[in-house]
């Protein structure tokens, strides 16, 4: 899963089981590696999981330095009850009630400020997450086309 193998993978699994986010330095390093590995390709880069304002600012700086498109946030908006139901239906061992509730609290604490930051910067796309997956996908593509990102 990660470059140092076993030790980091175990730590990440434990962190996720507790419903926490991995450390900022780890996820940001992964994003930076991904961006730098494909920065030469003249296409938009899609990265899943940017959850902190610090990460957005760092990745924006990298993209600006490379004269690339700005980082755009895509929020697939789903009401909390539905999120809970969907997570419970995945049948993962770490999707117990306590862990899911904790993840939702982490979302409010860490991700909501990031969404607000994107929104303030006029760089947020919000998609209705209650539609069927294929409709959600088409809506995302439409929004990206409007912004000339695909």
Image: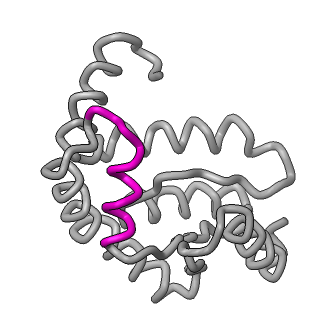
Image location of residue 16, percent across then percent down: 27, 38
In this image, 131 relative to 140: left or right? Answer: left
Determine which quarter of the picture holds residue 51.
bottom left
Extent of the magenta region: 81-93
Name the magenta segment's main secondary structure: helix
Q: Quadrant of residue 17?
A: top left
Residue at 21% across / 68% down in the picture? 109
* Residue for point 60% across, 79% down: 125
Farthest top residue? 6
What's the coloring here? one colour
Residue 17 in the image: above or below residue 124: above
Identified at 37% across, 64% down, the residue is 83
Residue 104 is situated, as x and y percent measured from the top left of the image, at 25, 63
Residue 75 is situated, as x and y percent measured from the top left of the image, at 52, 72
Which residue appears at 35% of the width and 60% of the height? 85
Q: Which part of the image, by quadrant, shows the C terminus?
A: bottom right
Q: Is residue 88 magenta?
A: yes
Residue 98 falls inside the magenta stretch? no
């Amino acid at each position: 899963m990660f470059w140092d193998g076993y030790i980091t993978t175990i730590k990440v699994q434990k962190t996720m089981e507790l419903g926490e986010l991995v450390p900022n330095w780890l996820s940001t390093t992964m994003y930076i590696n991904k961006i730098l590995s494909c920065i030469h390709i003249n296409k938009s880069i899609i990265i899943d999981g940017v959850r902190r304002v610090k990460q957005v600012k760092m990745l924006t700086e990298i993209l600006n330095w490379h004269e690339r498109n700005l980082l755009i946030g895509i929020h697939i908006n789903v009401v909390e009850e539905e999120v809970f139901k969907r997570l419970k239906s995945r049948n993962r061992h770490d999707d117990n009630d306590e862990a899911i509730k904790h993840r939702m609290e982490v979302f409010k604490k860490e991700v909501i400020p990031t969404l607000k930051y994107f929104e303030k910067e006029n760089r947020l796309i919000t998609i209705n997450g209650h539609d069927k997956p294929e409709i959600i996908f088409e809506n995302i593509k439409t929004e990206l086309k409007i912004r000339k990102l695909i």
